[in-house]
Amino acid sequence: MHKGLTAGVALALAMLPGVVRAQEGEKFDCVVTSVPGGTKDAIGAAMAGGGDEASREALFKQLGAVTDDCVTRHGIAAEQKAVYFDYSLARISREWLMGDIAKLGLAGVIVDKALDFGPGGANPDLSGDMTEDQIMKIVQAYIESGVDIEKVDGTAWEKVGAYAAATSIYWNKRKLLAF
């Protein structure tokens, strides 16, 4: 009996990190999975410069309500709420922009590699303007991937820049979330 109890406790403890990671994943995913698809599309388009100020404010208000619900549901600390909102906004924008630039024949992963975005990456802060060096890294990475940059119009480059900014915010805010 003692061996069975010990084995059961050992198994439960072994599963605990997976359960904790699943709960962490639910916290990270809560806002994104709770926002309707049409609203995600509207947020993505707004963050790429679409719409007017009033419509953006309405979208932020909707996102704020969903964020509040997720904060309450998952017991996220009040001081983390603004970071959680920014993370969620950046994640929704990043995912939308990734799809949008893909329609233009440009892959977001090229930007991710060029600027070293990702878990354990440098994740440069692009909350201000990108440097000339960062822009050239992106352009060079697209050239090396076979993209004829002469055929890429200004609107596409603006969306690539918005994707880079959203990705920067996404990774840097994610780091700050204490869960």
Image: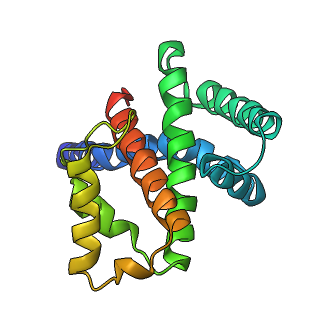
Could you say where residue 107 lies in the image, as x and y percent from the top left?
40, 73
The answer to whether residue 148 is left or right of residue 57 is left
Could you say where residue 102 lies in the image, as x and y percent from the top left?
49, 75
Camera-nearest residue between 162 and 173: 162
Camera-nearest residue between 54 and 173: 54
Could you say where residue 53 lies in the image, as x and y percent from the top left?
76, 35
Q: Residue at x 39, y 29 (%)?
A: 177
Q: Residue furthest top?
A: 79
Q: Residue at x 28, y 66 (%)?
A: 139
- In this rendering, the count of numbered labels is 0
Camera-nearest residue between 151 and 164: 151
Figure check: 126 above or below 4:
above
Q: Residue furthest front?
A: 150
Could you say where residue 109 lies in the image, as x and y percent from the top left?
33, 68
Asked if one can make out residue 118 in the rendered structure from this viewpoint, the answer is no
Q: Residue at x 25, y 41 (%)?
A: 124
Camera-nearest residue between 119 and 160: 160
